[in-house]
Amino acid sequence: MAATRNAVIYARYSSDSQREESIEDQLRVCTDYAKNKGYSIVESYCDAALSGRTDARPRFQQMIADAANGTFEAVIVWKLDRFARDRFLSAKYKHDLKVKNVKVLSATEVIPDTIDGILLESLMEGMAEWYSANISQNVRRGMLGNALKCKANGMTLFGYTINASGYHEPDPQTAPYVQEMFKRRADGCGKTEIATWLNSRGIRTSKGNPWTGNHVSRLLQNQKYIGIYKYADIIKEGGMPALVDAETFWQVNIMTTRSKAKANHSPLTDKVFCGYCGEKMHGGSGTSKTGKTHHYFMCSGLAKKTCAAKRIPYAELEDKVYRATVEFFEDAEALEDLLDALEAEAKRTHDDSQLKTLKRDLDDNERRQKNLLDYLEGGSDEDVRVRLDVLRRKHAEITASIASALSSRQPPSRELMRFWIEDQLNVGSSPDKKRERVLTSFVSRVTAEEHDLVIEYNYRPRNEKTPARVLVKGSKNDPVVRREGFEPPTY
């Protein structure tokens, strides 16, 4: 009696098709096929509502990985298009399985194991790929057709509902909140404050999530709220009901643009992290009762309600980091460490490849000239003399290129680097420009608590694996305390 062979079943259901067999039916057909062919099913891998045009299918990938264990000899599918609808993916993964002595079998398609069978299998896979692409094209065509009529295309939008005909119409429950959001922003209310107000009233986004300043910002910039319908390249003014007037909309967006430009102005943007939870601290702004706008760094965890860190004003943090940096590099040892790191980096990043190529060309040119001169010693040959003249001109060009490369390859001297660093750290002249340049160039990371800071710089001291750091303790008027070799905070 022949030994029983092991096999697995792969079943997939794609949500974009309207005539897919169910997972259960695929398993039943494949099980019957396995029984008739003498296979014992050891596992079933099923992916629901996932397209065969991608390999991002969890159970499919698990099956491919399990094939390396040698526990099965075949993968049985209801049809070949269940395995993949993309010919490249199909060929790739069939090859991967073949290397592991596993073959792919179709339970409903008769494909002979011959050269003609290979061609037939390729044809079927090509048809499956065409069918899948055709479905996607039809879906896109239908959505574009809807867009030309300014239909919603299933896209939910806060402040609107979708009526039975598929068009957006104002939602009597949420549309007034959209109008109030624009009004509050036009009156100077911050986006985070608006989000807090919405959340306090139990209002959620169209996806059911709590509001954040980013949610509010995106809504305030959406031109659909002034009646401009957009889908892909289709734009129609008056294509949907407007919830706010154009004058208010553009007033709010001019404010947002200016606020964003100011909020992103700090040279420490993207470098500041919360000393309590480790989250990045982003720029924000708010307007006081006097109408003055204040800019600050705020922990990302604050909006998520996972951290209670206080906001830190831009000016206060920038001044504190800058003065700490100046004091840090007043120490002769720290300055020499920085110069060592700059010199080493200049040498490491210097590219000698062009110079080496030129020198190689020069050696080759000189060798060929010598050969021609040796030949001319035996007599006169006009063609050889012409070639020799060409080589000599080329030699002069290569020599000039080498001289140019040598002159441009020299990194700045240590003394020149020292002069530049000391000039940047000298508060006396152009303090604002120098402060911005120091914070941009020298500082790599700032870990901030309410009063204490850990500042990391863009270099490593000699014999150290971590960046140079300084700890700043106490209020902004306290002296800087330098600590050697302390560990950064962990969360």
Image (spheres, rainbow, N blue to C red):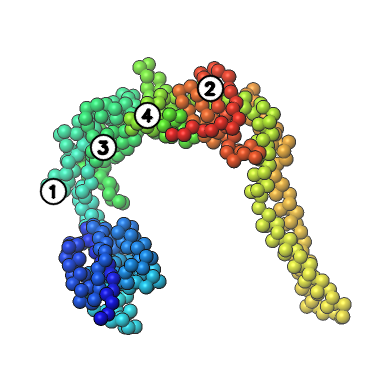
- State the image quarter where residue 288 is shown: top left
* Disc with the residue nearer the chain's start (1 vs 3): 1
Residue kind at label 2, given as amino acid type: Lys
Camera-nearest residue between 42 and 170? 42
- Which amino acid is tagged 4? Cys
Numbered tag placed on residue 473 in the rendering = 2
Which residue in the protein does label 4 denote? 307
Residue drawn 70% across and 41% down? Answer: 412
Amino acid at pointer 3:
Asn
From the viewer's perspective, is the residue at label 1 or at label 3 nearer?
3
* Farthest residue, direction left: 164
Describe residue 467's horizontal placement relative to residue 175 as left or right: right
Where's residue 349, x and y in %?
64, 48
Badge 2 element: loop
Say which residue label 1 marks: 165
Q: Quadrant of residue 388?
A: bottom right
Q: Is residue 117 visible?
A: yes
Q: Nearer the viewer, residue 161 or 186?
A: 161
Tag of residue 209 = 3
Real-space Cα distance between discs 2 and 3? 39 Å
> Is 226 drawn above or below residue 357 in the view shown?
above
Mark 2 or mark 1, earlier in chain = 1
Query: Marks 1 and 3, how far apart in space?
Result: 27 Å
x, y percentage for residue 64? 35, 64
